């Protein structure tokens, strides 16, 4: 019995939370072609981010790995064909045939069709909507025992707003950052900054291009302080606190969006 490539949950709310890099599953024919070690692949995925979509009634959680198809890249770059497409990693035993690539792209096309249906419905019901596009990123690329990358260029929370129309949505971005920055994270405050590590990927670009007046996408990247990015182990207390921090932003984001 085949399993779904992603899980969709619907509810009565103008917020959608996505975890499009959460997945770790590769279809069988591709898995046989893969020479990249499972641990190396997991390190570049965003494990556990699907848990945090629980902050919203509308949720999309990917089970398919970004190494099969990356939904946060333009269609022509959504399949990692060469090492330069994926952080210099050697992924496949040989170049992928076009029919193999096309099979992955059918999932890409289906995802964006289903996403459009959801967003059209949110737009019709509420007039406008906000998407929490949740990701995570590595900061210990030099090895498990090497020092982490400098804090100056690696905030704990990076909000990507590179494709956002700030004249229309800046108050929503500011509300998110102000609220999560003021959250009491075990007696301290999270380091929250805008467009430092990432400015947002294709998902936010697509939303802002297709729903310029009604859709606001917050591309949210958490530094992997909540887990050991080399072993894949997560820290339960941090997982819970990050979810609480995210949830604390919802009311202020809704208010700023006029919802």
Image (cartoon, grey):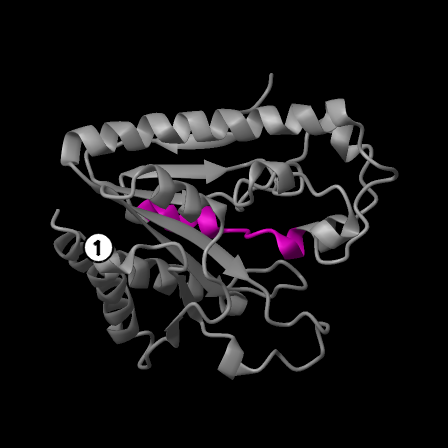
Q: Is residue 76 above or below residue 28?
A: below
- Image coordinates for residue 161, horizontal then vertical, percent: 37, 60
What is the count of numbered marks?
1
Residue at image coords 49%, 43%: 20
Q: Quadrant of residue 28?
A: top right
* Residue 148 screen position, x and y as percent: 62, 78
Q: Which of the 4 image quarters holds residue 211?
A: top left
Q: Magenta residues: mostly which secondary structure?
A: helix
Q: Which residues are magenta?
A: 42-54
- Residue position marked by numbered label 1 in the rendering: 168
Q: Quick one: SS at disc 1?
A: helix
* Of the pair 231 and 110, the residue shown nearer to us: 110
> Could you say which quadrant of the image residue 200 lies in?
bottom left
Residue 98 shown left or right of residue 201 in the figure: right
Q: Position of residue 92 (x, y in %)?
A: 82, 41
Viewer-proximal residue, 236 or 126? 126
Q: Residue furthest top?
A: 1
Residue 129 percent across, percent down from the top left: 23, 42
Q: Is residue 36 magenta?
A: no
Q: Residue at x 52, y 27 (%)?
A: 109
Residue depicted at x 30% and y 33%: 119
Q: Left or right: where does residue 67 sit relative to residue 51?
A: right
Indicate whether residue 50 is drawn in magenta: yes
How crowded pointer 1 is (Cα within 10 Å; few <14, some 14-19, many 20+) is rated as: few
Q: Is residue 50 left or right of residue 56?
A: right
């Amino acid at each position: 019995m085949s399993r779904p490539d992603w899980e969709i949950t619907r509810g009565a709310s103008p917020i959608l939370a996505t975890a499009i890099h959460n997945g770790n599953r590769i279809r069988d024919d591709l898995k046989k072609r893969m020479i990249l070690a499972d641990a190396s692949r997991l390190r570049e995925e965003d494990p556990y981010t699907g848990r945090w979509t629980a902050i919203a009634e509308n949720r999309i959680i990917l089970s398919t790995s970004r190494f099969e198809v990356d939904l946060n890249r333009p269609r022509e770059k959504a399949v990692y064909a060469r090492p330069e497409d994926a952080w210099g990693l050697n992924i496949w035993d040989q170049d992928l045939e076009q029919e193999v690539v096309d099979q992955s792209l059918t999932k890409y096309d289906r995802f964006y069709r289903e996403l459009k249906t959801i967003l059209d419905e949110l737009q019709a019901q509420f007039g406008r909507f906000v998407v929490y596009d949740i990701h995570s990123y590595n900061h210990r690329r030099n090895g498990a025992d090497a020092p982490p990358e400098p804090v100056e260029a690696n905030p704990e929370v990076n909000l990507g707003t590179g494709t956002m129309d700030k004249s229309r949505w800046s108050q929503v971005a500011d509300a998110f950052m102000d609220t999560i920055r003021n959250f009491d994270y075990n007696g301290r405050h999270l380091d929250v900054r805008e467009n430092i590590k990432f400015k947002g990927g294709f998902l936010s670009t697509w939303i802002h291009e297709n729903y310029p007046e009604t859709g606001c996408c917050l591309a949210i990247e958490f530094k992997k302080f909540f887990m050991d990015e080399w072993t894949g182990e997560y820290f339960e207390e941090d997982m819970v606190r990050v979810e609480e921090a995210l949830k604390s932003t919802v009311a202020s984001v809704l208010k700023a969006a006029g919802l």
